[in-house]
Amino acid sequence: MTSRRIRPIKAYKHFRNLIKDKEDTTQVFDIVEALDGSNLEKDFKRFMSTAKGQARFEDRKDLVPLLDDHETLRKLPMGSVGQHYCDFMESQGLSAQGLVDEYDRWGKRLEDYYDADVAWFGNRRRDVHDLMHIMSGYSRDALGEACVLNFTHSQHGGLGIYFIAHMASIEVRKHAPKGAPAWKAVREAKKHGAIADNICKQDIMALLAEPLESARKRLGILPPTQYNRVHDMMKNAGIDPFGVIGAAA
């Protein structure tokens, strides 16, 4: 197993850079690298210890072309996960390949540190990130990203994303109205991620074809009540949740 030193000071420096521009995804990669140690390999072993994980590994499909083929996904039924995913990605100007490009811009590759099997799994975790937004019900505002990361932390572990989630919630509290439950929102996201079935283990094409609410129910994903409450309180106070922390989403 790869031994990687934990570097909290480096992580904090990159977090301050992320606060300045929350669209600079390379800062996230730096934080994860600084704090995650051997988590990826441990998570891969957990993944491979399950029948679903082994099935996904046998296929080893490249998710990026699948997720970016909106022409095909738009043929799925209205209300499906795939339709909601396309709506979300197109409204935000995002693509699965775009996240890969950000990772390439970072200048490091998982293949440089891990064997091919672990690297494949790490890339799969990365490629489902935006799908996690759809399934968990959190948007791309700063608090939404923090909640998705804490949801993901429960499913995969990793001190890096846990650190970002909680530090970001502290920053959001500085801008939110008094009493807004930003801290409770990220804690709730962690609980929801722990209860839900692991999204990375799913047959992604089959998941995309399911009705969104049915898929959430099947996977045991609960609605984000505290996050929605923060949004309501901010909007009532004339604060744009998407304008908090760095560049707007």
Image (cartoon, grey):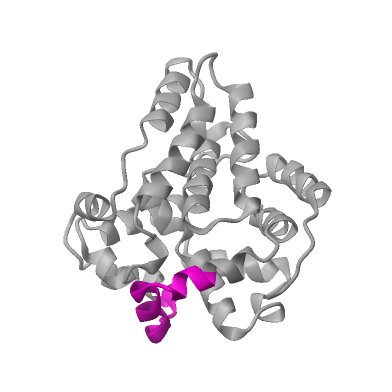
241 versus 19 height, above or below: above
Most foreground residue, 129 or 220: 220
Quadrant of residue 98 within the rendered picture: bottom right
Residue 74 visible in this rendered orientation of the protein: no
Foreground residue among 51 and 100: 51
Q: Which residues are magenta?
A: 44-65
Q: Is residue 70 visible?
A: yes
Quarter of the figure with residue 74: bottom left
* Residue 213 in the image, given as x and y percentages of width and height: 22, 49
Q: Taking 30 as reference, is 85 left or right?
A: left
**Residue 16 location (% of width, % of height):** 75, 41
Residue at position x 53%, y 51% from top?
Answer: 153
Q: Residue at x 77, y 44 (%)?
A: 12
Question: Residue 159, position in %: x, y?
Answer: 64, 51
* Residue at horizontal 57 percent and vertical 39 percent from the top: 248
| Relative vertical location of residue 121 with respect to residue 84 in this rendering, above or below | below
Most frequent secondary structure within the magenta stretch: helix
Q: Nearer the viewer, residue 132 or 34?
A: 34
> On the rendered structure, is 114 left or right of 184?
right
